[in-house]
Image (cartoon, rainbow, N blue to C red):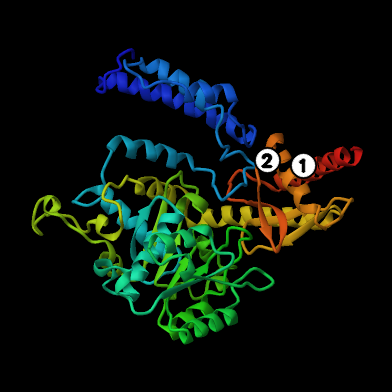
Amino acid sequence: MSRSLPDLEPRDFRALLYRAAEIAARHWERLPEMRAYTRPPDDVVASVCAEPLPQAATPLEEILDRIEREVVPYPIGIGQRRWWGFINSTPHPLGIAADLVATTLNNNCAGTSQMAVHVELKVIEWLAELLSLPRGTGGLLVSGGSMANLVALAAAREAKLPGTRERGLHALTRAPTVYASSEAHSCIRRAVELLGLGTDALRLVPTDGEYRMDVAALERMIAADRAAGLQPIALVASAGTVNTGVVDPIAAIADVAEANGCWLHVDGAYGAVGAALPELAPRYRGIERADSVAMDPHKWLYVPYEAGATLVRDPATLRAMFALRPDYLAVEEDAYLAGRVWISDLGPQLSRAFRALKVWAVLQAVGLDRYRELWRNDIAVAHEIARLARAHPRLEVLASSDLSCFAFRYVPRRGGGGALANPFNRKLLDRTHRDGRMFITGTMLDGKFALRGCVTNFRSTLEDAQICVDTVVELGEALEAEQNAV
């Protein structure tokens, strides 16, 4: 395998893949019990950053050796059994294998008659069925939640402000407004900004005591904006907020959207799949009325990155915003190359990877019955962490969750839950990262800094919940002792 030419003999290509598979398999074997996060050493980072552009070819074996030596030992840690930071799920092994095949095929999934496009259309159909969305729902796969929400809100802008694609926003006589709760994901703000509406167009609606959108406050804000001559165009409901994993009252928000002629978008990047759990389905009542839904198979369907999805009630709304077919892509309707759909007409990308293969494969490998078992286990682990935290005198739970999030803090003896608690817990969070037994993140809830996690990990158990709480208490008590000794 000494050749480094772009083209390889089949046996050399097979040997290359075997070598890469060995590296991946060794990592997979270590992953469940490895440190949850390992910061790359400064000397390794400096060495990589200082390297000049290669002028001559390097033997393939040497490059793979470098990958195993300099890259693989320092992952972000997704897949470790107590990795609960951000919202990153452990990837199903078949998804990894399918992604390798998709990369080898190297399809551009913009359009034409190819199996990759048919597989993506089937995946979209399955995802819509999973969420009990109406028949005929369409859409496309994108990189993740940020892009899924942007694509959906772009469709909303064109649907509610027709002609802005051609004429721009300067032709509007009334300034448009978009509404989301103060707990909405930050990508909603970025989408509003990227669509040219401006940050000021985003109205952040207060939440109630459970961090759900306050629908009465939403109605008051819309009425005030209309009275001021503004034009409400879209409402965004969260189906699983990133901070606490609660579901907004979607049905009530849908009523407000309908009464005001607004587009209803549901950001379910993380939690939309909870609609498929019978015991949680009432929380999602109204999602079937949404004009669009964002969801991420790479979050709670255990699919490898990247795999997000925009689902729309009427696919024509996406075409109105994005369809563009230059001459060099024109294909006659009865041509041999013609396919069912040009997916590039539904979103901003013309170059599109074959993301659908790994989603299609993992959905088959797991199946809805097993998914429900896995989701229930993730929820049980998160709720057990909250239960254990409530039972400990030094810990305070800061929010409950409909899904698999948890948020609590350590209450130090000196200063209690006052002003000193926030910097203490920030430092405590850093201690957990240095410790490496688990990975959680932080957030602010009503002015209190929380240790926050989200369990989307099929390796996590109730035993891990106990380890989480024990670790926080152990490190918190050690930090307290250090500070008291000063």
Alpha carbon of mark 1 to alpha carbon of mark 2: how far? 8 Å
Tag 1's secondary structure? helix
Residue depicted at 48% across the width and 64% down the height: 267
Residue 402: image location, x then y, percent: 63, 64
Residue 86 located left or right of residue 364: right
Residue visible at 31% across and 58% down? 347
Circle 2 — which element?
A: loop
Q: In the rendered image, is residue 380 in sight? A: no
Left or right, residue 214 beside residue 95: right
- Which mark, by number, is residue 483? none
Q: Position of residue 264 (x, y in %)?
A: 44, 74
Tell me the quarter of the image containing the N terminus.
top left
- Looking at the rendered structure, the kind of residue marked 1 is Thr
- Number of other residues with Cα within 10 Å of mark 2, as a class: few under 14, some 14 to 19, many 20 or more: many
Left or right: 115 as drawn, with respect to 225: left
Q: Residue at x 76, y 49 (%)?
A: 423
Query: Percent from the top left, x then y, of residue 420?
Result: 81, 52
Which percent across, then down, holds residue 407? 70, 56
Q: Relative to 322, is 442 above or below?
A: above
Q: Closer to the camera, 233 or 212? A: 233
Crowding around mark 1 (Cα neighbors within 10 Å: few <14, some 14 to 19, many 20+) is some
- Residue occupying the far top of the picture: 2
Q: Please say whether residue 379 is visible from this viewpoint.
A: yes
Q: Which residue is mark 1?
A: 471
Vertical side of 18 occupied by 214: above or below: below
Q: Nearer the viewer, residue 365 or 42?
A: 42
Quadrant where the C terminus is found in the figure:
top right
Kind of residue at disc 2: Met
Tag 2 residue:
438
Label 2 near label 1: C-beta < 8 Å? yes
**On screen, residue 36 above or below 370:** above
- Sequence-wise, the earlier of marks 1 and 2 is 2
